[in-house]
Image: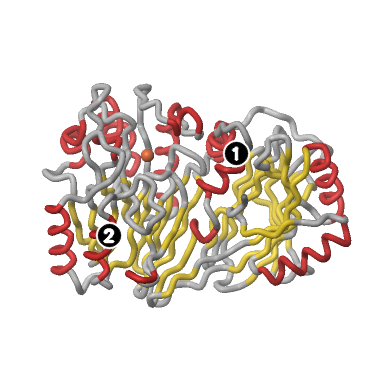
Amino acid sequence: MGSKIKLTNSTGTKITNEELCTLGSQHAVITWVTPQQRADTSMYIGETPKHLKKHTFALDSEFHYLEMYNLKPSTRYWYQVESNGVKGSLNSFTTLPAPKGKYLFSFAVMSDTHINYGEVAEDINEIYFGKLVDYANPLLTQCILDSKRRNIDLAVITGDLTDTASRLQYLGLRNQLLPYFGDTPYLLCPGNHDKYTKNSGLGEQGFLDNLADREKTYTSIIFKDYLFLLIDSCRQDENWGDIDPVQMRWIESMLTTNKDRPAFLFLHHPCNGPDLWFGIKNNREFLKLTRSFPNIQGIFCGHIHRNYVSVNRLMTGSRPYVEVPATVQFPCAYAVVRVYENGFAYNSYKVSRLDLSEMSRERFILKKGGKAILTRYCLGRIGDRSFSYFNDQLFRPKQYELSVTLDNTNANKLYENARSIDGASLIPAYDTKKAKVILGRYDSLHLTTQAFREKFFRYGAYARIMEVGNES
Ligand SMILES: [Fe+2]
């Protein structure tokens, strides 16, 4: 965990990288860092800015992982984090509506664990983008333990289980890591890395012989009367995806046979829209095939190592296509899907080893402001990390921010001034010589523009308004 640093007085304490990670109908997760200072993890929260109640969750940490329970659905809350007496900005969120109908069960989705045991693919993610190959094992282990604490009934891992498909990696997964699931059943899709044969990789035969416990790389199960289809979108030594004709026919026949059952589909590669980056090449064919099955509730994939949710209004209405983040790379996260009679709620959570998530962020290297790019791209927007989907309606929360980007000296001056008056936080800017001061984050544009005027008169700062996670 973080370095041993004594609790100091508030002088020098900074609230950095504050993020609303997860938002449900009754809970929310907020994380932040107080660099090189161990401090308390506290928050003021209430339904109006004038009536906030303080809660303290931990006493002595540099990495703050705060989870708030017992919130009311579809309700606006105001909140302000605090460490060592120093406050972040006064922000707001509105909790998601609870899906209608009875709660049925939940399952975890994880992806891109890239277990390597020292045999690494040496790809650009590792060299430039913070892929923590040396911490792949503890990250997977912790994600399994974290998700089990959330009372999952099942787990699915959507590929890139291994980094190079070596024998050692498959055996380590089977004998040392996956057993952390205990009696929780788990299902596996292969990823492109699990089909490598270069560098002594075993390719898909390694996956079949050691992990899958089945004859084919694709499979299906009925769980609690829901159809789970695990599709193989990978080809040997190929990073792009593709679903072969045999599987296309199998998918159609499985969906036809089970047309009265709700279905969840899983594959390694993204399959929706024109913004595919190394997705499945025959995505139009796949979308055409699946559009006529309204029983498909959601389609989950990994591969891109980011939180991202999209829809295809023309072809499939508001059905969500969900890119699940990697466990091995910032934000180092997993997702939990809670299924109700009429739909489901999706939440992705950073791993509780926040020190590792932050280490990945710090290792992201680009000449200019790589960390800011990473934040936008891999963390996504709050609506990419949390949503509710029921009665064919998709509810995605939003958060807008008021921020000022200045050179480091002036950013620190504004930050010191704002934190002494009504709170603020700091995050890296695109340009590494600059920093971004967050003066507030709000769940509506109306609130943001109101706050813009207040902050302008208070600080003389002409703040920029943008959706959080959509910076440029
Ligand atoms: Fe991957």
Q: Cβ of disc 2 within 8 Å of ligand 1?
A: no
Q: Position of residue 202 (x, y in %)?
A: 20, 28
Q: Is residue 227 left or right of residue 309?
A: left
Q: Nearer the viewer, residue 53 or 215?
A: 215
Please give the name of the residue rendered at 85% of the width and 42% of the height, measured from the top-left corner.
Answer: 413
Q: Position of residue 317 (x, y in %)?
A: 37, 72
Mark 2 lies on a secondary structure that is helix
User: Toward which corner of the image does residue 143 lie, by quadrant?
Assistant: top left
Q: Alpha-carbon neighbours of circle 2 within 10 Å: few (<14), some, or many (≥20)?
A: some
Mark 1 lies on a secondary structure that is helix
Q: Is 365 drawn above or below residue 384 in the view shown?
A: above
Q: Nearer the viewer, residue 291 or 41?
A: 291
Please give the name of the residue rendered at 70% of the width and 32% of the height, measured from the top-left corner.
Answer: 36
* Marking on residue 12: none
Please give the name of the residue rendered at 17% of the width and 50% of the height, measured from the top-left corner.
Answer: 244
Q: Is the N terminus in the top left, top right, bottom left or bottom right quadrant?
A: top right
Q: Alpha-carbon neighbours of circle 1 within 10 Å: few (<14), some, or many (≥20)?
A: many
Name the residue tied to disc 2.
284
Q: Amino acid at mark 1?
A: Lys
Q: Is 360 drawn above or below residue 93 in the view shown?
A: above
Ligand 1 quadrant in view: top left
Name the residue tied to disc 1.
371
Q: Is residue 64 left or right of residue 280?
A: right
